[in-house]
Amino acid sequence: MHASALIGLLLPFGNLLAPFIIWLIKKPESPYLDEVGKEVVNYQISFIIYSLLCAVIAVITCGFGAILGIPLVLAWIIIIIIATIKTSNGEPYRYPATIRLIK
């Protein structure tokens, strides 16, 4: 589920849709998969909110604020890779700076 969010590099909102669909399919299989799915979906929703805030700042600053998007996207990619590696080793992973809307 974690790595599926990287589809967002190719498709708009793919970072949210892919993990969401996988979570809906897999959550009945185990409570662990349900928790992982909630964590991934919450992180992707948070990333979209932060991206929209960067876009607003970019508009207000006539484009200069767009520079904020570069570290945001790099952190997004790195954190997804870390989460994928940790969960593949059986360790639970909690994303940093996540707004937990789905409980």
Image (cartoon, grey):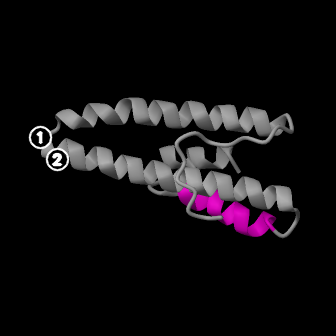
What residue is pinned by disc 1?
62
Question: In the displayed structure, does residue 15 sit left or right of residue 89?
Answer: left
Relative image position of residue 99 (x, y in whole percent): 52, 53
Residue 30 sits in quarter: bottom right
Q: Is residue 81 visible?
A: yes
Q: Residue at x 18, y 33 (%)?
A: 64
Relative image position of residue 39 (x, y in whole percent): 66, 53
What residue is pinned by disc 2?
59
| SS at circle 1 | loop
Residue 88 sits in quarter: top right
What is the CA distance from the residue labelled 1 to the residue labelled 2? 5 Å
Question: In the displayed structure, does residue 67 sit left or right of residue 75?
Answer: left
Question: In the displayed structure, does residue 33 sit left or right of residue 76?
Answer: right
Q: Do tag 1 and tag 2 residues touch (Cβ < 8 Å)? A: yes
Count of residue discs = 2
Give neighbour class at mark 2: few <14, some 14-19, many 20+ (Cα, 10 Å). few
Q: Residue at x 54, y 48 (%)?
A: 98
Indicate the amino acid at tag 1: Cys
Q: Residue at x 79, y 42 (%)?
A: 92
Question: In the displayed structure, does residue 88 sit left or right of residue 74?
Answer: right
Residue 103, numbered label: none
Q: Residue at x 59, y 34 (%)?
A: 79
Q: Residue furthest left?
A: 62
Indicate the amino acid at tag 2: Val
Magenta segment range?
15-27
Quadrant into which the C terminus falls: bottom right
